[in-house]
Amino acid sequence: MLKFVVRRLLQMIPILAILSVLLFLFIHSLPGGPAIALLGERATEEGIEQIEEDLGLNDPLPVQYTRYMKNVLQGDLGSSTRTRQPVVEELKQRFPATVELGLAAMLFAVVVGIPLGFIAAKRYLGVLDNTSLFLSLIGISFPVFFLALLLKYLFAIKLGWLPTIGRIDVTRGLDTPTNFYLLDAAMARDWEAFKDVLRHLVLPAIALGTIPLAIVTRITRAATLDVLNEDYVRTARAKGLDPSVVDRRHIMKNAMLPVVTIIGLQTGLLLTGAVLTETVFAWPGVGSWILDAIRNRDYAVLQGGILFFAVMVAVVNLLVDVSYAFLNPRIRLR
Amino acid sequence: MRKRLRLITVLTILALLTAACADEGADEPTTTEEGGGGDATLTFGTSADPVVLDGALVSDGESLRAIDQMFEGLVTLTPGTTEVEPGLAESWEVSDDGRSYTFQLREGVTFHDGTDFNAEAVCFNFDRWYNFKGSFQNPAASYYWQTVFGGFSDGKTDSLYESCEATSDTEVVLNLTKNSASILAALALTNFTFASPEALQQYDADKGKVDAEGIFSPTGTYATEHPTGTGPFKFESWERGQALTMVRNDDYWGDFEGNIQTLIFQPLADPAARLQALQNGEIQGYDLVDPQDYETIQGDENLQLLNRPAFNVGYVGFNQAAAPLDQLPVRQAIAHSINRQEVVDAFYAGQGEVATQFMPPELFGYADDVTEYEYDPDKAAQILEDAGIETPVEIDFAYPTDVERPYMPDPQANYEAMVADLEDSGLFTVEKKSATWSPDYLDNVDNGRYGLYLLGWTGDFGDPDNFVGTFFQTEQPAWGFNNEEIFSCLDEAEAETDEDTRVGLYEECNRLIMDFLPGLPYVHTQPGLAFTANVSGYAPSPVSLEPFSIVTVEE
């Protein structure tokens, strides 16, 4: 097992190295650069030249890349051209926000999606099955930002139940040592703040979780249908086992394998999906940060942020592979 | 049965949870009264975080908006206007040669850290700016110093600044290397407000390291955690992406007319999110209202729409280096062929007016009697025929993509309407061009790669020099002309220190410019701000210098 993990970790190195080169080339081939983004209409020839000189953008690309990677390996992702703060510092502050949102969204998708898919399969071609199919199709095809607008309109503006922006009511003073606000509020035993954070989490989590929800529902349904027809299920039933035990031990457990895979893959995708959701909900996470960086041609933030995303996706995939081993001893990895 | 029971239980728990969450927020007050004085809280939605809270090192609107609440300069502007009025200087005198300004400072003013504001503090700040080195000279940082004063103490470029003398505790003399009539208006810029010398040193405002990429990162905490001015609000806390919180300065020297105790700027990059947050009462105001949302806001009795006086101009630039735009009749014919009124009516949601010249009517020096070019395709045809120019005339015309500007909310729509006008007249064939605003489009314009192009400008300070002086005082590739008469008119007007003479000179320059027709100005707009209906006293300013200390939030 350990060997497997180590091998997978080693495999990640060339992947990330290649990715970093592509990323670097891609970002530096974006039209223009920070200089004009910083100056806008007020850009003059001399101004642009001076900024490019200052930022070291006149050096050949390989030189810039080597310099960049040397720093990255020492844990230095450079400084944002806009805020002039170290990228690592900003990442530390923003990543917990994205994780909190991502986990909430995934929780929503799993808690609703697995039972829904399971029941749909059990009522194959019934009303509930067809409804869930129809809804998941809508879920997949609905643009996230539009769904977000609708959710906000309904649950915030019309019904007045929930807030539309941010992670917490900004007039509330909460100490945030970990930047995981739910955790921070719980540690401070500030339950009012905890509730406030929870309320802020609901709409963005639903918006971000809708696509994974639809996918989890459909995969659960398909996997359950497969298992339902297996011999061992028939045998279990035939020997008079309680149907709920058959459901739990024989059907659910075996149907979970593909579902876990998809949860893992979707968690990786959630990070990227967060770009839109975070912007629409003014959620101060990595996603909105990267979008701002694109707007401002903030090379260091773009490179650092995307590289970080890539590492996260790779790590999540590794975790998925490892979890296989636990779920299914037959494919215990050599 | 058991299953159904379980389902019902789950649903009940969910419903209870939702209700528990919902109840609490339903009627949460947006303002709180903490015994006497009506200590209101106002949360304002901004489009982005400030860069840093050091006026000397920023040029973006969001940084300036925040700094403006906490810092003050020698002079300021009467709220809602571009008129200069006393700030931390009670009065001033100009020497006969216009090169030295003597300011009498207000007494009894203290910085937020309790240290005294005095003549030495003023000179400390001026010396700090003048002695900026290395990355501080980067135009993204000290853009406004360079615009107003030119160079630094290292002498690489000439500087307007000569010296600052603290002749007594309350008297400061600012010496310039030549006279400049626009200096007073420029000193009202937020960039020239004063920071506590002690705080600047204690929190290492000028210390930092240049990393391998050449970016200067301040290691000090002055500009992020300890900005210290004399203004009506003082810094409380700042979490990027979340909120900048300021509280009322109880020791403020001046009148604090409003009732805001806590002022919060919350960055909301998405315009739709800003509107919904306002409708939901999470914020009480926001800037940069999308013109398409004007109707929604005006139709909601809980909201109000305010407009900034027009302080911008949108124009079609003509690059005279590109034939046939070097011929005046061609430029005139283009001007007569474009129906500007229709463009303004169609795409500015009622917040635009047709421009007759390159600066807004609110500004002194605006001339009522410039040559105007009304929409008249027949006249355009006549002009070309009289000049013996063969039609259709071939021109190229460009517009920017991926951009919205106050003077140009929808560039493509403007462009398409204008191109249709030009082609329908039968006088022109248009080669259509476009590019991404930043950087390709701006780069192409600045380097004279287009013939006709859409562009515009928003003023920084209330002086015509900031409009026509920026465009036409020197030869520029974007315009591609060399007209000594206009250049020297603007030189003379900029240097003139007698206010009345100066007004007359700028009027004259505007007449010259519009006869020469280097481009076709077509719109001035009034950008919108939205507030909840219980907010009053906000004074929209043409240059966006808007103090929250005069704002009241009703319970």
Image (cartoon, coloured by chain):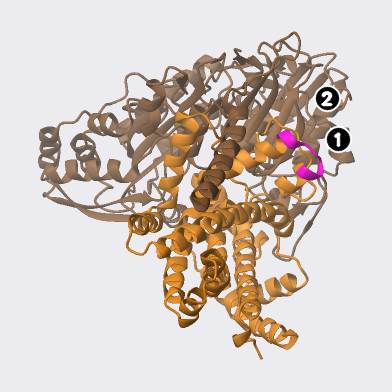
Relative depth, front residue between A144 and A76: A144
In the picture as drawn, the residue positioned furthest to the bottom comes out as A334
Q: Could you tell me which residue is drawn at 73 percent across and 59 percent down?
A: A88
Q: Quadrant of residue B104?
A: top right
In the picture as drawn, the residue positioned furthest to the top comes out as B36
Q: Which residue is mark 1?
A: B199
Amino acid tagged 1: Ala
Colour representing chain A? orange
Segment colored magenta: A186-192
Q: Quadrant of residue B258?
A: top right
- 10 Å neighbourhood of mark 1: few (<14), some, or many (≥20)? many
Relative depth, front residue between B348 and B97: B348
Residue B111: assigned label: 2
Chain of the residue displaying label 2: B
Q: Is residue A309 left or right of residue B108?
A: left
Q: Is residue A69 left or right of residue A133?
A: right
Colour representing chain B? brown
Mark with earlier residue (1, 2): 2
x and y percentages locating residue B291 in the rendered image: 38, 32
Q: Is residue B318 above or below residue B486?
A: below
In the picture as drawn, the residue positioned furthest to the front comes out as A240
Q: Is residue B45 left or right of residue A210?
A: right
| Label 2: element kind | loop
Q: Would you say the residues marked 1 and 2 are in contact, meaning their CB atoms lie under 8 Å apart?
A: yes
Q: Could you tell me which residue is drawn at 64 percent across and 81 percent down?
A: A325
Relative depth, front residue between B38 and B369: B38
Q: Are marks 1 and 2 on the same chain?
A: yes
x and y percentages locating residue A293 in the rendered image: 57, 55
Chain of the residue displaying label 1: B
